[in-house]
């Protein structure tokens, strides 16, 4: 009876999922309700988790609940610690959830809601969740080793070196792009800039409260900080309405870029507790709260999607970023489908907290499903807007023109009607002077989120508050990533330089701190500056570069996973990681080829450099040509390095399968867990 | 009702772990200290060195 009920239950889920995915995929013409996307996603995740992740857990990884994990064997009360699985799940999700799953899907919405939705669902279930799950388990079986260490042990020194360089590269490009998103969201926005500026004294206050008044009460002080941030958002409207104050908080994009670089340097070189730790807590508090609020809002309000399933821009002529649906949709959306960066988290803190091997399935596969659900919410937020409004916000001035009437006319000529008056009214409703040319995805996401919430909570009168709440939420946690990322990259560089000259490796030696912080900030600051000065808005060049480097890191992670699976004598199941690997190789190598050599100057870096060289010369021409050539070179270097890892991995697989190469499994020895006996 | 209470406790435990309150409690246990301004300073000195090396995802 139970079995019959189970079959009936899962059959219903499968049927419902098929109907929902079918509706999302074939529906054309009339707007569709967002609930179809929610149902399709829920059913896909449920089926993927129940059947696919179980298949991987049982048939390939052979999870063993009796095998002691490093959290148990090496428990030290600090890094290694046996932790409740739901607590680890929350911790892991909080670490992998960043701006990526919000920004990527918003940008990819220029192709329509369908490509992004299908990639997010299929990519997560068959690739992203699998990568996070297997890397987590393999790290658990290797005493919590990092991806770089596992690549070195399993593939060889080339693998380890490439993983290291890829991590540094992705960090630098990510930080440059993330900073650009903040700049584009805050430029000429006194309200937004004031709110973000206020988070600094609020964080300092939180730091003092944590130290002096209620030591260690982080949740309490985060809630207090949140209330103060809400007050700052409320107060921001008065700043924007006061001409003298508004002038103080109105900055151009280059000025904001310089301020953010100064902030990044200071944040990397100053003590953490003073500003960064409280801001980090505040950012996490706001992030988790907003994601939960957005999920509830979408389910309860189930808004209508106005964006068509597919737009004309699948042909590669899109204004948000140039390039055809294949491969560019698949590198634009990384974190919501598969992200190499997650492999760093899955082989970082999380494996040291897992109490039992069997819990890696829920934590690794399950948390990535939640991340993917966040990406679905971002698609919904982008697609609830009228398409004309979406394109007016996300299109750079270099494509649609600077003047409002000209931009509106250009966008309307694409078949997405919008008027300058509509955009003026919307800008007024959200408390901004203009919403044109706000590239980067964050303002569009904020408008979408404000649109969803203002329809039920507060109506149009609260639209401006919701918008600035969303901007604050995104800018706050992007800035947190900036300071954390600069520090992580600084430590990595210090570790490497320490091999050349010992004092440079000392993380407490101030000359080294200042030099390496300056080096890292200069590196991502260069990309930021390049984006700010780019007539095409910067996102067109930098986001694909970020997507490519992130997916190339995922390629390295899947190479490591496939190598270990083959070494475990599970070669007949290697397709589980090999197919996503082949897909990623196809996507990233094709995208890299286009970004380097495509003859269209909007797509290819070298073609753009060539077009600039033969066009009218200006003071900036030389710099723009150099930037494009540099971007092409960075892409080329990353591709060559990942090719080396692929070749090295292929040699390993071939040798093992032919029996000419040994396949030592470099796992920690089996030790029986004591937790089972302790729990009776 | 029991399940709701249990769920709430787990939820709060997750928040305490995410916000490092649990790490502070473990530090106090290990060091045999009571919560105070000095204890929290000592905890941050030890904890921040490890925490700032952890990557945050994009």
Image: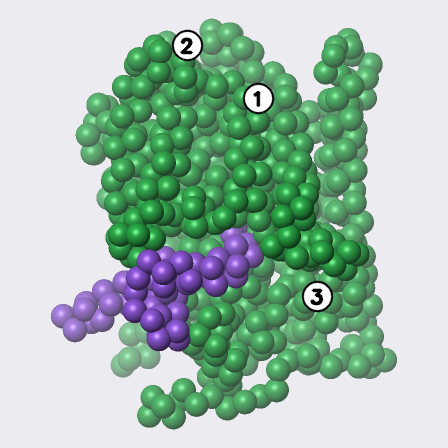
Image quadrant containing the N terminus of chain A: bottom left
Q: Position of residue A233 (x, y in %)?
A: 30, 30
- Element at label 3: helix
In this view, the residue farthest toward the left is B1
Judging from the image, mark 3 belongs to the subunit labelled A
User: Height in image: A561 above or below A106?
Assistant: below
The residue labelled by disc 1 is: A254
Q: Position of A91 compared to A120: left or right?
A: left
Dot 2, how many residues are within 10 Å of its Cα: few (below 14), some (14-19), or many (20+)?
Answer: some
Secondary structure under tag 1 reads helix
- In this rendering, does residue A199 appear at all? yes
**Quadrant of the rendered structure where residue A293 is?**
top left
Q: Which mark is residue A310?
A: none
Return the residue nearer the eye: A522 or A293: A522
Q: Earlier in the sequence, mark 3 or mark 2?
A: 3
Q: In the rendered view, would you say A326 is above or below A69?
A: above
Front tag of 1 and 2: 1
**C-alpha distance separating marks 1 and 3:** 40 Å
Marked residue chain, label 2? A
> N-terminal of the two: label 1 or label 3?
3
Per the model, the C-alpha gap separating discs 3 and 2 is 54 Å
For disc 1, the chain is A
Q: Which residue is rendered at x = 50% and y = 48% of the image?
A: A271
Q: Is residue A456 left or right of residue A303?
A: left
Residue A294 location, x and y as percent? 32, 43
Q: Is residue A438 left or right of residue A576?
A: left
What residue is pinned by disc 3? A151
Side of A626 where A262 appears, left or right: left
Residue at numbered disc 2? A420
- Same-chain status of marks 1 and 3: yes
Q: Colour of chain A?
A: green
The C terminus of chain A - image quarter: bottom left
């Amino acid at each position: 009876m139970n079995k019959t009920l189970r079959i009936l239950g899962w059959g219903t889920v499968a049927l419902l999922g098929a109907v929902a995915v079918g509706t999302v995929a074939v529906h054309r013409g009339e707007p569709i309700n967002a609930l179809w996307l929610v149902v399709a996603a829920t059913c896909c995740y449920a089926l993927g988790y129940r059947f696919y992740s179980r298949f991987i857990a049982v048939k390939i990884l052979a999870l063993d609940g009796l095998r002691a994990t490093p959290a148990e064997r090496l428990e030290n009360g600090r890094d290694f610690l046996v932790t409740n699985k739901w607590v680890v799940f929350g911790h892991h999700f909080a670490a992998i959830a960043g701006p990526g799953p919000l920004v990527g899907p918003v940008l990819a919405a220029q192709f329509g809601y369908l490509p992004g939705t299908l990639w997010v669902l299929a990519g997560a279930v068959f690739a992203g969740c699998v990568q996070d799950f297997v890397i987590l388990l393999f790290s658990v079986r290797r005493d919590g080793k990092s991806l770089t260490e596992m690549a070195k042990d399993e593939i060889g020194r080339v693998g380890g070196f490439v993983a290291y360089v890829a991590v540094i590269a992705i960090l630098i490009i990510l930080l440059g792009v993330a900073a650009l998103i903040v700049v584009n969201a805050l430029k000429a926005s006194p309200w937004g800039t004031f709110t973000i500026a206020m988070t600094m004294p609020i964080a300092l206050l939180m730091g003092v409260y944590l130290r002096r008044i209620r030591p260690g009460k982080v949740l309490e002080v985060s809630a207090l900080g949140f209330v103060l941030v809400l007050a700052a958002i409320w107060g921001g409207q008065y700043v924007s309405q006061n001409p003298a104050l508004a002038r103080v908080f109105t900055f151009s994009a280059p000025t904001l870029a310089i301020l953010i670089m100064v902030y990044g340097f200071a944040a990397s070189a100053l003590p953490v507790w003073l500003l960064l730790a409280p801001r980090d807590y505040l950012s996490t508090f706001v992030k988790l709260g907003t994601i939960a609020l957005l999920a509830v809002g979408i389910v309860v309000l189930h808004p209508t999607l106005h964006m068509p399933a597919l737009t004309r821009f699948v042909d590669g002529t899109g204004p948000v970023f140039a390039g055809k649906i294949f491969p560019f949709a698949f590198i634009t959306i990384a974190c919501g489908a598969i992200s190499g960066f997650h492999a760093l988290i899955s082989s970082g803190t999380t494996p040291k907290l897992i109490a039992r091997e069997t819990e890696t399935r829920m934590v690794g596969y399950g948390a990535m499903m939640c991340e993917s659900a966040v990406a679905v919410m971002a698609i919904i937020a982008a697609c609830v807007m009228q398409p004309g409004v979406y394109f007016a916000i996300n299109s750079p001035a270099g494509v649609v023109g600077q003047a409002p009437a000209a931009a509106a006319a250009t966008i309307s000529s694409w078949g997405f009607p919008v008027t300058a008056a509509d955009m003026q009214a919307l800008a007024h409703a959200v408390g901004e002077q203009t919403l044109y040319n706000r590239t980067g995805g964050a303002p569009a996401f904020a408008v979408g989120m404000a649109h969803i919430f203002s329809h039920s909570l507060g109506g149009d009168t609260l639209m401006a508050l919701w918008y600035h709440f969303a901007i604050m939420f995104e800018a706050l946690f992007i800035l947190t990533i900036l300071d954390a990322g600069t520090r992580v990259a600084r430590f990595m560089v210090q570790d490497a330089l320490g091999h050349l000259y010992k004092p440079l490796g000392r993380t407490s030696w101030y000359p080294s701190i200042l030099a390496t912080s300056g080096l890292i900030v200069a590196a991502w600051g260069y990309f930021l500056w390049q984006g700010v000065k780019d007539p095409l808005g910067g996102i067109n060049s930098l986001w694909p570069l970020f997507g490519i480097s992130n997916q190339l890191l995922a390629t390295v992670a899947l190479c490591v996973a496939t190598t270990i699976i083959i070494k475990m004598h599970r070669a007949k199941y290697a397709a589980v990681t090999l197919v996503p690997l082949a897909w990623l190789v196809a996507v990233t190598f094709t995208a890299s080829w286009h970004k380097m050599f495509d003859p269209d100057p909007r797509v290819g870096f070298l073609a753009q450099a060539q077009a600039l060289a033969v066009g009218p010369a200006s003071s900036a021409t030389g710099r723009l040509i150099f930037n494009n050539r540099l971007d092409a070179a960075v892409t080329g270097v990353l591709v060559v390095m990942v090719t080396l890892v692929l070749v090295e991995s292929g040699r390993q697989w071939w040798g093992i399968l032919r029996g000419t190469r040994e396949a030592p499994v470099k796992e920690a020895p089996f030790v029986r867990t004591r937790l089972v006996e302790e729990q009776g | 009702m029991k399940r709701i209470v249990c769920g709430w406790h787990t939820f709060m435990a997750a928040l305490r772990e995410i916000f490092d309150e649990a790490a502070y409690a473990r530090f106090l246990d290990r060091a045999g200290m009571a919560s105070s301004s000095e204890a929290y300073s000592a905890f941050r000195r030890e904890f921040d060195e490890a925490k700032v090396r952890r990557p945050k995802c994009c």
